[in-house]
Amino acid sequence: MSRRLVLIRHAKAQGEHPGGDHERELADRGVADAAALGGWLEDQDLLPDQVVVSTAARARTTLSAALTDGDDVEIWEDRRVYDGGVHGIAEAIRETPDEASVLWVVGHEPTMSTLVWDLADEDQLQEDLRDQLSRGFPTGTAAVLTLESAWGDLGSGTCRLVALQTGRGERSAH
């Protein structure tokens, strides 16, 4: 069974929050960008069966804006996505039930792009995607990877990067 892993960097956040980094919310632009990204993911038939999301406010709000109908989606808030690094996120992914065919992980930079580089099979990495990824992983971006084995088998080079998409919502003129 082919599984699809969608690694999402949270959308544009506010610069500061009195409660610290973990409590930063999305900027208005971030909400619009997350909604646009969610629309693209829905158009690509990439709505999740399961989500693992950072416990940080900006990641949870990105998920809420991107996933308009999450009634049938199991959502796990996991601190490892906030501060567990590549290995912590990979561990969380490997814990995903095998019934899930599409998994979203909503997290932060530089961990999300580093994880994409780690999971993607270099021999199958298309030149345009390699170039796009090497230019950075902007806020509100999703990397779509395929995995041809069980979630528990996830490891370096076990996925194929098939798409990178940055959501950009409507801008208001100020």
Image: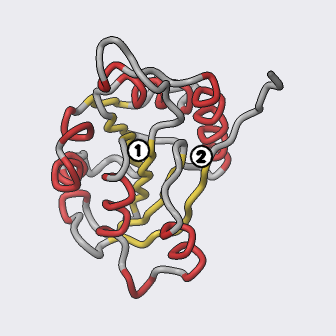
**Would residue 84 appear left or right of 57 to someone viewing this image?**
left
Residue 109 visible to an observer of this rendering: yes
Relative vertical location of residue 97 with respect to residue 74 in this rendering, above or below: below
* Image quadrant in which the C terminus is located: top right
Residue at horizontal 31 percent and vertical 52 percent from the top? 111
Question: Circle 2 is placed at which residue position?
Answer: 41
Q: Position of residue 173 (x, y in %)?
A: 83, 25
Q: Residue at x 59, y 26 (%)?
A: 31
Residues 95 and 62: in front is 62
Q: Residue at x 44, y 52 (%)?
A: 6
Label 1 sits on residue: 104
Residue 90 image offset from top left, x and y in percent: 22, 54
How many numbered marks appear? 2
Q: Specify few, some or many for label 1: CA neighbours under 10 Å numbering under 14, 14-19, or 20 or more.
A: many
For the residue labelled by badge 2, is the local secondary structure a helix, a strand or a loop?
Answer: helix
Residue lying farthest to the right in this orientation: 173
Measured from the top left, where is residue 138 in percent x and y? 53, 50
Q: Position of residue 12 (x, y in %)?
A: 53, 34
**Disc on the earlier residue, 1 or 2:** 2
Say left or right for 44 vs 47. Answer: right
Q: Is residue 136 above or below residue 41?
A: below
Q: From mark 1 to mark 2, how far is it between C-alphas?
A: 10 Å
Q: Are marks 1 and 2 in contact (CB under 8 Å)?
A: yes
What residue is shown at x 36% (from left), y 78% (from top)? 121
Dot 2: within a 10 Å radius of its alpha carbon, few (fewer than 14), some, or many (20 or more) residues? many
- Amino acid beneath label 1: Trp
Position of residue 68 relative to residue 51, above or below, is above
**Callout 2, which amino acid?**
Leu
Q: Outermost residue, top direction?
A: 18
Residue 148 visible? The answer is: no
In the rendering, which numbered label is found on residue 72?
Answer: none
